[in-house]
């Protein structure tokens, strides 16, 4: 076993060699911080920062493929590390994209947005293709806000702007935060699996059923399981009430034909849009009109086992 730490320009390496093979490595890459998808597509990428990519089981990248684990809406990466472990057990190389910690200040603010997750993903894929060559398969896994980023990453205008995203073959939107209306065309390159617990009152399965009904998404498949928010992760305790933030039970997220966001109250009483108010004012409106606290959350052993078996089956 040999450990090498070195600095090479803007890329910092921490590499673990065993038997002449590189099995684990960490690299820093430079990314931007776009507030929204539409701003990113117009060239507004915001502050440039370094983020870390943490790879494990690199010897499987050619034979099995790469599972990319993206952050959710906070800098806590316990769930993401658990997802990575599960994917390595299935046989994949994993990379955890640590993009939240350098930016995150508060949930559902412009300090960390789904567009930033999309941009980080694209730059991570560019790095992977250059350093390791194209993986056999590219899988995405992310929860909550990260799941919204997964969907946005597969919109055709986004892939046209960031072509590395075209290499995604499978995507799992965990505790999926589904938009209601998606005007831009969804690419058919990847199989997208939308995953929800049937008792989840934070990112409800009903919102994803609505998305599937309202939009042409033949490559999107709904997977539902008994259980609540984070039924799939044994990081969490058994089901209980928690004091977490949520917005989807109160408001819908939507993308217009130019990938600009708009948000509507589910009762039809009010709305705000990136087009009319600008992103920052729209987000402030969301804080004042959509965010609520308190939902059910917890691990469901039986449903988790079913889900991870489904991941193995669906990615063969």
Image (cartoon, helix red, strand yellow):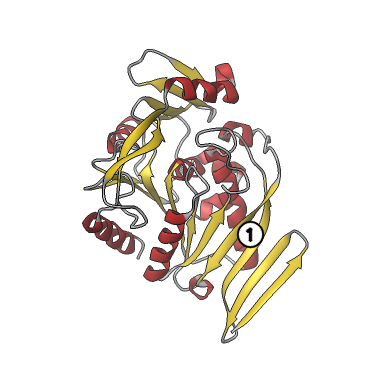
- Determine if residue 180 is in view: no
| Residue 211, image quadrant | top left
**Up/down of 88 relative to 227, above or below:** below
Q: Is residue 63 left or right of residue 311?
A: right
**Up/down of 163 relative to 21, above or below:** above
Check the picture and name the quadrant holding the C terminus: bottom left
Q: Residue furthest top?
A: 269
Q: Residue at x 41, y 21 (%)?
A: 264
Q: Secondary structure at mark 1?
A: helix
- Determine if residue 89 is in view: yes
Query: Label 1 neighbourhood size at 10 Å, few (<14), some (14-19), many (20+)?
Result: some
Can you give x and y, in whole percent of width and height, for residue 133 in the image?
A: 59, 67
Q: Residue at x 48, y 33 (%)?
A: 184
Can you give x and y, in whole percent of width and height, for residue 238 in the image?
A: 27, 51
Which residue is more in the foreground, 39 or 229?
229
Instruction: Look at mark 1 in the image and give the residue it sits on.
Output: 127
Q: Residue furthest right?
A: 9
Q: Is residue 249 left or right of residue 171?
A: left
């Amino acid at each position: 076993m040999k450990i090498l730490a070195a600095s090479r320009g803007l890329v910092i390496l921490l590499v673990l060699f065993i038997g002449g093979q590189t099995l684990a490595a960490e690299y820093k890459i430079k990314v931007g911080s776009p507030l929204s998808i539409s701003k990113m597509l117009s060239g507004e990428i915001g502050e440039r920062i370094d983020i870390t990519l943490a790879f494990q089981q690199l010897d499987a990248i050619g034979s099995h493929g790469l599972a990319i684990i993206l952050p959710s809406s906070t800098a806590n990466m316990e769930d993401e590390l658990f997802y990575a472990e599960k994917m390595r057990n299935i046989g994949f190389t994993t990379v955890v994209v640590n993009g939240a910690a350098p930016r995150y200040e508060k949930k559902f603010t412009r300090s960390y947005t789904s567009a930033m997750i999309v941009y980080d993903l694209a730059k991570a894929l560019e790095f992977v293709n250059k350093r390791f060559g194209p993986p056999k398969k590219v899988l995405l896994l992310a929860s909550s806000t990260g799941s919204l980023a997964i969907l946005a990453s597969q919109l055709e205008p986004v892939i046209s702007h960031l072509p590395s995203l075209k290499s995604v073959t499978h995507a799992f939107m965990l505790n999926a935060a589904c938009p209601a209306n998606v005007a831009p065309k969804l690419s058919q390159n990847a199989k997208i699996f939308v995953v929800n617990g049937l008792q989840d009152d934070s990112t409800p399965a009903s919102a994803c059923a609505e998305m599937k009904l309202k939009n042409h998404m033949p490559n999107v498949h709904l997977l539902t399981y008994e259980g609540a928010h984070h039924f799939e992760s044994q990081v969490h305790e058994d089901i209980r009430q928690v004091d977490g933030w949520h917005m989807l039970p109160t408001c819908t997220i939507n993308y217009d034909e130019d990938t600009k966001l708009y948000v509507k109250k589910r009762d039809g009483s009010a709305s705000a849009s990136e087009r009319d108010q600008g992103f920052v004012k729209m987000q402030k409106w969301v804080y004042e009109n959509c965010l609520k606290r308190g939902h059910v959350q917890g691990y469901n052993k039986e449903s988790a086992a079913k889900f991870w078996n489904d991941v193995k089956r669906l990615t063969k």
